[in-house]
Amino acid sequence: MDDVRTCQIINDGLPKFIVPIDSAKCNQHQAFLRCQGAFNVPEEKLCNAIITSYIHFVHPQLPVVDIHDLLQALATNGRDCKISILLFQCILLSGSTFVEMEHVTEAGFDSRMGLRKQLADRARLLYDFDCETDRLVLVQSLTLMTCWQEAGDEVKHLRHWIGIAFNISVFIGLNKDPTSASIPVQRKHLWKRVWWSCYMKDQMLALGLRHPPIISADECETPDLVLEDFDIRPPTADVSSVFKDCGLLFDIDQQNQLASVCIAQQQLCLKLSKVLKARYETIAPRLGCTTTRTLVSVPRTSITNTPEIQNCASELTSWYRDLPSILRYQGSSSLQFGPEQDLLIFHCALLNLHYYTLLCVLQRPWPSAILRVLPASEICSQRKSRLAANAISSILKDLQVLEMVHLLPTSGITSIVQAAIVHMSDSTTEIASLRDQSRHQLETCLGFLDTLVEVHSYSLFAKSFLVSAAANLYREPKYMEHLKTFGGSGTQQHEFGEGNIFTPGSLKLTSFSDIRPSLVDATNDHPTVFLPKQSADSQPDIPSDLLDLFDYGQLELDLSPDLFLNLGQADFSSIVNN
């Protein structure tokens, strides 16, 4: 009887559009959860603005929810349908990344990070106290929870969440073909979208973290996404009246095109794991340590014409050839679809950024191609990586004209830094025109990272790493001046979560002359990583060699500096200082 009364107390305080909570653990700790604000939702104006941002920038990439049911629940205040409180908080968390700052400040928050942390804390609490028992909802929520990481080396890491989502998915057969299942057609479509969203998120995390994906292609027994799976239809009258400022809801043609972009992204992700497997191997230089991450990804080979790499290149070429021409980036005017279709331009640009990032990862020679004699096959590979990096920079410039760079997800920073690495390598050439162009492109990439500092925490970390590498390479005053703003107790500090201030200079990233890239002993069945210190008189290696191991900007989501380096912070400090 007491449990029933407690459950009634919880549900009486919930918005009417929320599904009633029926969880013994949640009921037992309802006073604590209420005190922590776990059941609170933002006021209506901010809430609707975040939902609109979610529809515009998250749902086209990760269509994990039935958007019509979500909007109908909100528009009718639960009259026609309701939504899980956990899933709703996760939707708000992911959408808050892109909401306009005027809504954030009007709601009383000093920064976007403050709003995101509050929403993330609520979602974490609801998950930890088992407020949700529907396993499909759990997969949806966990997939969206990977958009936030407060502490870099915590046990509940991004792969922790996507790993749980995968395990639950397999447990309920989400990866199976639902065609013959006796469930409504709309439910079958949602089933497929949730599975492929989980898969795509895992693959993009693998690209960012340079770790093997958790989900293998062999686990994917459900058919590929098709246009019908997106259940595109006009909004109801109720939804139209409440979300009249969400133009995408009323543009069916643009919704169809965005669905095509998502389908193409799913196909591209099927190639991604093969690229990482062909190009990188994962080693554990601190095997046995249980208090921090020990895995490091290093280039598998120093040449790019192996059969595995050539096969990946062929598959990427086929993917691009099969991509509808309207979705290809071919120049500054190729993504101009029509008036008020900036969202379509944005998501097409993001799709092409992912493609060219994969090309850079696959084709970039290691070590630096500029400084060694190359066979013809690797010269061709070098040129491909340069063209891909230039394409990334060109796409970003187009987004800058549209004032949309600040709307990039964290995978966009992966693309920016990957392009910057190639530009930095090319800037060492003796060809003056290429050298000058590459230097200019590198500085442009640093400018893009500046634009994203207020949106994504580690944009500043990525910039500090690239500036340090450039200062070490060029030895020029302007880069040394840049370093002063990052060093010691310098002026450029950045808030990472609530109460945590990080100064990039605290990692002593300028000490590249003391480090050489890891050398993998290929003769050993269990590879060992050597990090010898250079003598003071020796010339430093080109940073692009180092960046292949310490790919500072390749992380997919908001992580602290120690994970940008794929080593614990203490490990890196000891390498620099010894």
Image (cartoon, rainbow, N blue to C red):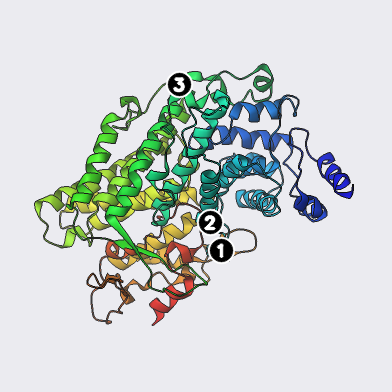
| Occupied quadrant, residue 137 | top right
Residue type for callout 3: Pro
Q: In terms of depth relative to the viewer, which is nearer, 172 or 149?
A: 172
SS for dot 1: loop
Q: In terms of depth relative to the viewer, which is nearer, 478 or 7?
A: 7
User: Which residue is labeled 1 in the image?
Assistant: 155
| Residue beneath the point at 52% across and 66% down | 503
Residue type for callout 1: Val
Q: In terms of depth relative to the viewer, which is nearer, 396 or 350?
A: 350
Q: Is residue 537 left or right of residue 8?
A: left
Residue type for callout 2: His
Residue 490 x/y as whole percent: 51, 68
Tell me: residue 246, above or below residue 165.
above
User: Which residue is labeled 2 in the image?
Assistant: 160
Which of marks 2 and 3 precedes in the sequence? 2
User: Which residue is labeled 3 in the image?
Assistant: 339
Q: Are marks 1 and 2 in contact (CB under 8 Å)?
A: yes
